[in-house]
Amino acid sequence: MAEPLLELRNLTTVFPMRRGAVNAVSGVNLRVQPGEILGIVGESGCGKSSVLLSILRLIRQPGHIAAGNIFFKGRDLRRLPQKKMRAIRGNEISMIFQDPLSTLNPVFPVGEQIREAMRLHGIANASPLPWPLAGRRSHEKQRVLDVMAEVGIPAPEARYRAYPHEFSGGMQQRALIAIALVCEPTLLLADEPTTALDVTIQAQIMEVMRRVNREHGAGIILVTHNLGLAAEFCDNIAVMYAGRIVERGPAQQVVDNPQHPYTRGLLACLPQISRQRSRIDPIPGEVPDLAGLPPGCAFIPRCSLARDACNSVDLRLRSLQANQYARCILYEDGVRYTVEEFS
Amino acid sequence: MSVTSPTGAPAIAGRRQARLELWQRNARRFLAELGRQPIALLGGLVVLAFILAAVFAPYITAHDPELGSLRQRLIPPVWQQGGAAEFPLGTDGQGRDLLTRIIYGARISLLVGFLTVAISIIAGAGLGAVAGYYRGWLDTVLSRFADLLMAFPFLIFAIAMMAFIGPGFANLILALTFKGWVEFYRLVRGDIMSEKTREYVEAARALGRSHPTIIVAEILPNIVQSIFVVGTLRMGFFIVTEASLSFLGLGIQPPTPAWGSMVAAGRDVMLTHWWVATLPGLAIVLLVPALNIFGEGLRDILDPRLKVQ
């Protein structure tokens, strides 16, 4: 297999709190191939966003990455000096946030913000013509307008000087994607990019992201709580619960044939459009407090299949079938006993 | 609000021109808003009149502000009996034209107000930004020091300091800014602390911006308006404080015309020649409220939170 674009090995991110250390991410192993779209799915507070922020090393103090490696194109980002890390952020790895209005700086025109992102990493110098021929500035602006058009902002010339609050929600998110794209990153981290938008706009934004993936070959990690969206959009899905990956596999396979009780629970929560009014089965209970989590499976209190043994066993991700893995007592015994490894 | 579209703009405009157009658009919008606030506009016009008078003082009046003629002592204002058209507001005890001295006095007042505010903003906002963004021991030390300074009443502190370092223009500025920066420190520190938690700061980090750049290029433009408003309001306060110090003989020294010392000089003849003390006092009463009214109008116009209503 080719060298992966991104590989997380045993990533563990800890927030020391007064009530105890919170392992927002504990022992996560993930791989993203170039051009792959990976979905990370789970409820709020299960550590999805912390994975993304850990990759960029933007975990807020006093939180920190306690263990593990983050290999990006073969380099371990954890060991990179601050300055080199800054050169990667926004340039090779870009992030798209959930709430576009608060993510854009309210006092600068949108076009200027896109341009600033480009200037920050010196992309502007990449004019095809030497300086005296192509005015560097005009070249910069042209590039901004191109990107704006590419993400589907109509009449970019007219909107270049508009302020964020003058944009609609969908346009704001497009502007945000434009900022993320302008340096042509090879990895795009999208943190619930469509949660703040209505469904039709959501579809358009996902279409833009898919185009980015196809045309630029950028790998994407999509964090979402919407399993349906992930199934439709992603190549592979990782389901997270309480800071751990509980199930991982090709998107279609995970959705059609979920193995972990939590994944099944998430699927049962999805509303279906059909003639009969079908029941939505919520998962009882809520995500546990990650501080002082007891050993064993964290899903026990909410799991209908829980048994005594769940409390004691140190569960691992077990390989079930082609590329599908789950972390559950159901798969600890007998035939399918294979420890998942990356080698 | 609709998307503003500069239709027909050339496909590629220079960045400098874009900035200029932006500035012009903002200025036009600001003036239009000011027009909707007649009282603030009036305050602004009064301040502007004082500034113009101070700048063009030698062209407005032909008299010497510091040298009088003993033969022309204590001439009443022109509208009173015995007044002379040559001295519209009369003369003081040394025969100097009062109008001339008030106009030159505006120079001192405005200069003190402006310099004190400017230095206080640079020091206070700079330290406040660093303390509010990075926190840590520096923040603790600076904030405790600021608390300490806050514990003193301003005037008492300024009097003590002037008594210690002696009168004079530079010392006056020093005494006023030594405590004046605290106001801006607290303002900017608080603003930065709240802005820092906003998502655009995190997004800027994710774009690869460094902390100093984020403070200067991302956060500061968001809070510069409140600095501006408080600056205008504090200016009036500094002018009054300077006048108080000069009145007490601790500030600007005679014969340099300063409103405070002019009031002090007129005290002795107050009952017989009221104008010598009253008219410089009126100048203070005119300029300071005008500054405050203008500042509050600025706040109404610039503060986005108030604008929503």
Image: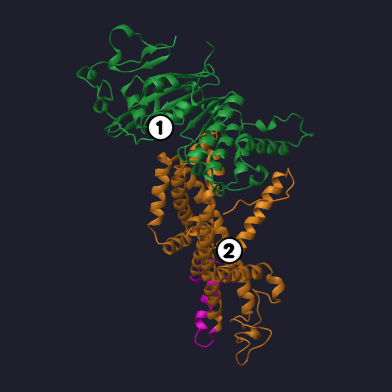
Chain colours: A green, B orange
> Residue A46: where, in percent of width, then height?
36, 30
Lateral position of residue A257 relative to residue A142, left or right: left
Quadrant for residue B84, please give it: bottom right
Query: Which residue does the image show at 44% across and 45% down from the upper left?
Result: B193
Query: Which residue does the image show at 53% across and 72% down from the upper left?
Result: B260
Q: Which residue lies furthest to the top in this view?
A: A335
In this rendering, does residue A161 appear at all? yes
Is A106 located above or below residue A325 in the figure?
A: below
In this rendering, does residue B210 appear at all? no
Amino acid type shown at disc 1: His
Label total for image: 2
Query: Which residue does the image show at 49% across and 45% down from the upper left?
Result: B129
- Residue A225's label in the rendered image is 1
> Residue A223: where, in percent of width, then height?
45, 30
Instruction: Name the chain under label 1.
Output: A
Quadrant for residue A112, please give it: top right
Quadrant into which the C terminus of chain A falls: top left
Q: According to the image, label 2 marks what residue?
A: B33
B265 or A159: nearer the viewer: A159
Q: What stretch is highlighted in magenta?
A: B245-274
Amino acid type shown at disc 2: Glu
Q: Which residue lies furthest to the left in this view?
A: A308
Is B141 located above or below residue B259 in the figure?
A: above
> Residue A131: where, in percent of width, then height?
76, 33
